[in-house]
Amino acid sequence: WNTLGLACQRAGQREAALDAFQHAVALEPNDIEFRNSMGFLLVDTGQAEKAVAEFERILKKDPNHVGARINIGYAWLQKGDYDRAITQFRGILARDTKQPAVHYDLGLALKQKDQLDEAKKSFHEALRQDPNMAEGWYTLGITAWQTGDFEETIDAMKHAVSLRPAYAEAQLHAGYGLEGKGRPGRGEGSAARGDPAGSFGARSVQHADADPADAGRPGRRQEALRRGGGGKTKEGSRGSAAIGDARRGHD
């Protein structure tokens, strides 16, 4: 069941993955890695309250379980309990700063608290550690747009599009950046419509009615930073539950 769950998770079949992990936990209720994977999928399917209970069970047995410590913070983030999420993520980073996904999630929580400058610092650190995180560049660009830094918006969106050429929302919001700088795109009003063709070519842009202030909200991440993909590896040892193999599930 665990192997099936991992396969479904990597294939983006979240409900099937959750069902498989629930079967795995039912068969081996003391296996905290199975429970951690199940907990992450609970968060990922909108059941953060149940997930918190599972991670608390794990941490009662093993207070230093890295995956569960990260995941409970992620669950609080999804629940909208931003203060607890911030405290949790900062505690994790105090022990180990080399956690790009945690820096990113900390930035998301800070962003939701309107601490935009602090959020940008967290996104910068996440991207310094993992420059291939397209969603990180995108969310940094949105946060820069919200603070009026249109140059950084454009630069961040260029990075996002270079990593994922079909990233329509990044192209759209680069247009907002161009508009903010007073640099129209191709044709009257094109920047407002999200058609920064002068920068990225004549690629059609989807979601042109999107609100840039919505971007970067925890529930809208284009890439799932998979923390629940641990479990037993082929060698029979435990894989890292902190960030699983499918840490950017839509690249």
Image: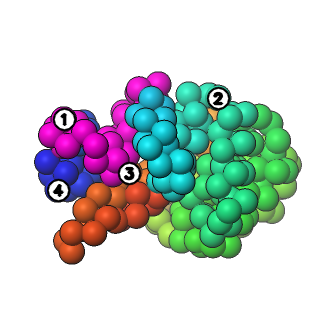
Q: Give the number of the disc on residue 228.
A: 3
Residue located beneath label 4 in the image: 3
| Crowd around label 1: few <14 · some 14–19 · many ≥20 (10 Å) | few
What is the magenta range?
A: 22-51
Measuring from the top left, give residue 85's x and y in whole percent. 65, 39
Q: What residue type is labelled 3?
A: Gly
Measuring from the top left, give residue 80's x and y in whole percent. 62, 28
Residue located beneath label 2 in the image: 81
Answer with mark 3 or mark 1, whichever residue precedes in sequence: 1
Mainly helix, strand or loop, the magenta region? helix
Q: Nearer the viewer, mark 1 or mark 4?
A: 1
Element carrying mark 4: helix
- Distance from the alpha carbon under mark 4 to that under mark 3: 13 Å
| Residue depicted at x 41% and y 26% | 50
Asked if the residue under mark 4 is in contact with the one under mark 1, i.e. CB atoms within 8 Å, the reply is no
Q: Which of marks 2 and 1 is in front?
A: 1
| Crowd around label 2: few <14 · some 14–19 · many ≥20 (10 Å) | some
* 154 lies left or right of 32: right
